[in-house]
Amino acid sequence: MDISEIREKIEKILQEAKEQVSAGNPELNEQLKSKYLGRKGELSQIMRSIGQLDYHLRPEVGKLANYAKQKLEEIFSTAGKVRKPIERRFDPTLPGRSLPVGGMHPLKRVLRESIEIFVSMGFSVVGGPEIETDYYNFDALNTPEDHPARDIQDTFYIKKPEWLLRTQTSPVQIRVMESQSPPVKIIAPGRCYRKDAIDATHYYAFTQIEGLYVDRDVTLADLKGILTGYGKKIIGEDTEIRFRPHFFPFTEPSVEYDFSCPSCHGTGCRICKGSGWFEISGAGMVSPKVLRTVGYDPNVFQGYAWGMGVERITMVKYGIEDIRLLFENDLAFLEQF
Ligand SMILES: [Zn+2]
């Protein structure tokens, strides 16, 4: 070997050592160290060959070899100091990381369940505009000009007279009856607005489901059957219904209906404030005046109609005492459902 060959060989050793050394693998580094620096290592072989070289070349090769030894030691000691990256090994015995799964808002859930129940009873679902006219919201429903519900204190008027935010979904019933002949068997779910002061039982917006069935030989007993069936499905099998006489301009006779308290089943407890019942909403037989307004002959057709607040049903079903909880988006509250 001549001097240039030796120099090349040393450069090659240094280059390889640099490339092969691995910060995260001390075992490999030990192997490399003995491969290059060990007694039988590549550098030792060069050192040993010095004796066979020409006398005048020996000092220079010796210097090169020492330089290489120093460099190699540097390479291996630096590799040892580099922090080993944390090894992320897959551990199949650990429990999986669960992702939070969203749930349906209780109000939405009761709305959907209610729609399903009425659809299963043969009702079709219809919608209508939330911005209504005086005519559809009041006049067509036999609500006279001086009725308190028409007061600016109770209704959000957009432009008085005429445009307002509907206070009930009944306008949808009128629109449907105007556009088709009996039989009509519909529910109209949707948002309604009333200028109520907000408290535990009132809110400025609420979700209503109104039902209407117009056909031959429809009776109040049919209405009671439908509402009883609904109450048993949505609140519980042992739910009872109670009709109390009432007055509404668009039904005759009119009733208010109550469901029995799901906690005490009518005997009275703290939740129902001792009464055993929860007032739900109004219902009745569609007024002949309303039927005539839409062009139906009240001597041939009868109909029943009812309303219900989905918020109210949700509160009775889950024992919620404050309606505001349904609108505040408090996760601690909502996660209980
Ligand atoms: Zn009770």
Image (cartoon, rainbow, N blue to C red):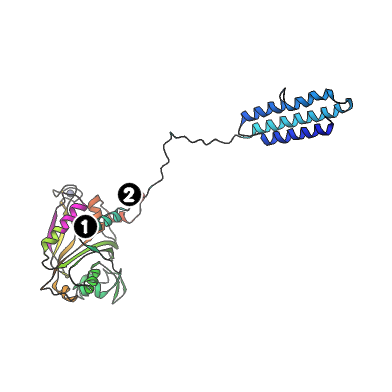
Above or below, 88 against 106 in this view is above
Q: Which residue is mark 1?
A: 120
Q: Is residue 87 left or right of residue 92?
A: right
- Taking depth in this image into account, of 130 and 162 the one nearest to the observer is 130
- Per the model, the C-alpha gap separating discs 2 and 1 is 31 Å
Packing grade of label 1 (10 A; few <14, some 14-19, many >=20) is few
Report if residue 188 lies within the magenta region: no
Residue 260 in the image: state x and y as whole percent.
16, 52
Q: Residue furthest right?
A: 56
**Mark 2 near ligand 1 (CB under 8 Å)?**
no
Magenta highlight on residue 240: yes
Q: Is residue 150 left or right of residue 59?
A: left
Question: Residue 333 has which mark?
Answer: 2
Indicate the position of residue 163 as horizontal and vertical percent values. 30, 74
**Residue 268 at what x, y percent from top left?**
15, 49
Tell whether label 1 touches label 2 (CB within 8 Å).
Answer: no
Q: Which range is magenta? A: 226-245
Give the foreground label among 2 and 1: 1
* The disc label shown at residue 293, or none: none
User: Which of pointers 2 and 1 lies earlier in the amino acid sequence?
Assistant: 1
Observer-nearest of 82 and 144: 82
Quarter location, residue 73: top right
- Quick one: 134 or 291, which is closer to the camera? 291
Q: Residues within 10 Å of mark 2 (few under 14, many from 20)?
A: few
Horizontal and vertical percent position of residue 158: 32, 73
